[in-house]
Amino acid sequence: MKPLLIVFLLLLSPLASAVDTYQLTNPEQQAAYNTLVSELRCLVCQNQTIGDSNAELAADLRRQVYEMLQQGKSKDEILQFMTERYGDFVLYKPPFKAKTGLLWLGPVAFLVVGLLTVFLFVRRKKTIPSAKVEDVEKLAAVRRLLTDKDTENLS
Amino acid sequence: MQRFYHLNMLKFIIPLVLFIVLAVFLALGLRLNPHDIPSPFINKPAPLFSAPKLTAPIEKLSTTDLKGQVWLFNVWASWCVSCRSEHPILNQLAKQQTAVIVGLNYKDDPAAAKNWLDTLGNPYTVSIMDQDGRIGIDWGVYGVPETFVIDKKGVIRYKHTGPVTADDVQNIFLPLIATLQAETL
């Protein structure tokens, strides 16, 4: 029972995110806060959102988001504020631009190439006959040669 | 027979091409520094600030005070390890008096910061305090040390992330400062 309990508690650990969750009175603003902190990248610990990270910069950016929401700024205004300062890199969902095209289309291209390969591979397999008349004849010829050799050696 | 020969060649050529493309991408990725995030500030006006000076907190320094001169804006802190390796380089650069060096003492304890300047030397014409990191956010600071080069019009022309080395000074900073000093307002 005890090991199970430990496993269960360990599974809960991802739920324990950001220490200083700010509380906004307006539920809509609270929802905006929650999405923003999960969409903005912590630039120090690059594979974490500012909501997940305990880095000082992440804490400062959370405070910034909180304060801007309190001032009545919209989600887009806050995202614009962040990209003006940190570039598109701060966004976990970068906008679709010429520069980010490969990022967005790359996976689709890979999928298409993969499906195409599978399709061609399967189709080609089907068209190859299992054994041709030619092969059967060749096989017989080889057998004949082998047996001839055997008889030659015996004599 | 000829057709089969071609197909067999393709069997080798396609994976080879894919492998080369992948290898090139990965090789490029290895050479890139993930902490070098292109600054969106290049060729944009420097963000405004008005902040208390480290040595005289009653006095404030603002961006407008620096208009008309080429200046470097160096983000530093006494808790920052790589700032220590950068410090002698900045001291040297300051001695050459090619440009004003303004320090942004980022999220630091003023006493520790003053002690740092007393023991290691002070390359800054003036240092301002940013104890809660708000000026840092405004300038898109994410890793200390960082160094910006601002021209006479108050436009950011260059940003360096990480410690400045002697090579950087010779190859990047001094030539850039010279060009910017030659520009007229």
Image (cartoon, coloured by chain):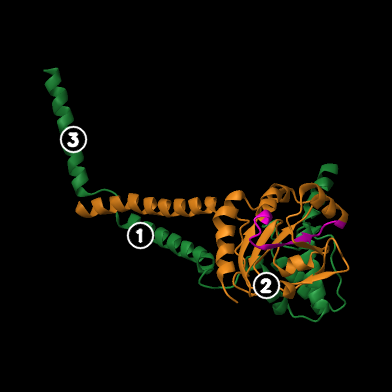
- Residue B156 is a magenta residue: no
Q: Position of residue A28 (x, y in %)?
A: 80, 79
* Residue lying at 80% horizontally and 81% vertically, measured from the top left: A72
Question: Which secondary structure lies at badge 1?
Answer: helix
Q: Position of residue A130 (x, y in %)?
A: 29, 50
Question: Which secondary structure lies at badge 2?
Answer: loop
- Per the rendered image, the range of residues in magenta is B94-110
* Residue lying at 75% horizontally and 65% vertically, measured from the top left: B136
Which chain's residue wears label 1?
A: A
Which chain's residue wears label 3?
A: A
Residue B43 seen anywhere in this rendered image of the structure: yes
Q: Position of residue B77 (x, y in %)?
A: 77, 55
- Graded by Cα atoms within 10 Å as few (under 14), some (14 to 19) or many (20 or more), the crowding at tag 2 reads many
Q: Nearer the viewer, residue B137 or B83?
A: B83
Foreground: disc 1 or disc 2 = 2
Q: Which residue is mark 1?
A: A123
The quadrant in which residue A26 appears is: bottom right
Q: Nearer the viewer, residue B114 or A129?
A: B114
Same chain for mark 3 and mark 2? The answer is no
Foreground: disc 3 or disc 1 = 1
Circle 1: residue type: Arg
Picture mark count: 3
Chain A colour in the picture:
green
Q: Which residue is mark 2?
A: B46
Question: Which secondary structure lies at badge 3?
Answer: helix
* Residue lying at 58% horizontally and 58% vertically, measured from the top left: B174
Judged from this view, the residue extending furthest toward the top is A155
Residue A91 seen anywhere in this rendered image of the structure: no
Q: In the image, which disc is placed on residue A142?
A: 3
